[in-house]
């Protein structure tokens, strides 16, 4: 089983971990207007799922900003930042920070995404920092479970996977 830490303290992940080559699991999360969002809503595009414990923390803030900046040069790529922050808080955060190319979605209701991708932190009911790239055929072409929650993901590796998937 995969292990992640928070400041060196071990945490337990639940859900089914995925790997490169797997079919991307479906999920249902909430958009900022409380509408449902699933894997199929972005069918036909390459997707980046940027998973963050909470947008109101410095690393998560920077992670989402970085993917928002990268989105300007990525055509036919859908980027979702997934967290358990409430949709209202996500909308406020995006507005306050000028985030307009990444869609923030909330998994707070039933942890559908978190369980499908194996990123639910049992002790905290948050999602573990991770990045998943899904190609147009719904195959995972990049999977990164960041081992320490206070560390950044490997942006360059994720972006290379996006380029290779197109």
Image (tube, helix red, strand yellow):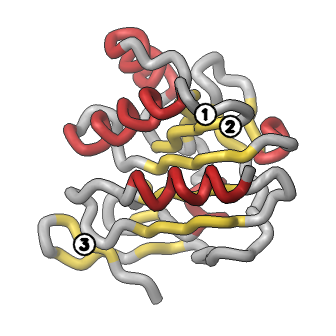
Nearest-to-viewer mark from 1 and 3? 1
Considering every residue shown, the one lying at the far left of the view is 7
**Whole-percent x, y for residue 47 in the image:** 67, 46
Q: In this view, does 27 lie above or below 78?
A: below
For marks 1 and 3 on the same chain, the one whose residue lies earlier in the sequence: 3
Does the image show residue 133? yes
The Cα–Cα distance between marks 3 and 2, rounded to whole angstroms, is 30 Å
The Cα–Cα distance between marks 2 and 1, rounded to whole angstroms, is 6 Å
Residue wearing tag 3: 5
What label does residue 77 carry, if any? 2
Judge from the rendering whether residue 61 lies leftward or rightward of residue 127; answer left or right: left
Nearest-to-viewer mark from 2 and 1? 1
**Whole-percent x, y for residue 147 in the image:** 31, 72
Does the image show residue 126? no
Element marked by disc 3: strand
Give residue 29's quadrant in the image: top right
Q: Residue at x 68, y 37 (%)?
A: 77
Q: Are marks 2 and 1 in contact (CB under 8 Å)?
A: yes
Q: Which residue is drawn at 68% across and 31% down?
A: 75
**Whole-percent x, y for residue 87 in the image:** 52, 26
Seen from the viewer's position, the closer of residues 162 and 92 is 162
What label does residue 74 carry, if any? 1
């Amino acid at each position: 089983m995969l292990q992640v830490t928070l400041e060196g303290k071990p945490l337990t992940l639940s859900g089914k971990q995925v790997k490169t080559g797997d079919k991307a699991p479906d999920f249902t999360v909430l958009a900022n207007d409380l509408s449902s969002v699933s894997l199929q809503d972005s069918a036909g595009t390459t997707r980046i799922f940027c998973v963050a414990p909470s947008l109101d923390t410095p690393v998560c803030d920077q992670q989402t900003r970085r993917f928002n900046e990268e989105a300007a040069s990525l055509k036919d790529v859908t980027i979702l930042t997934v967290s358990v922050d409430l949709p209202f808080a996500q909308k406020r955060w995006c507005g306050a920070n000028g985030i307009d190319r990444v869609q923030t979605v909330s998994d707070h209701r039933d942890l559908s995404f978190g369980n499908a991708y194996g990123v639910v932190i049992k002790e905290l009911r948050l999602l573990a920092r991770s990045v998943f790239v899904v190609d147009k055929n719904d195959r995972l072409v990049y999977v990164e479970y960041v081992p320490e929650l206070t560390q950044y993901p490997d942006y360059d590796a994720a972006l290379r996977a996006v380029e290779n998937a197109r």
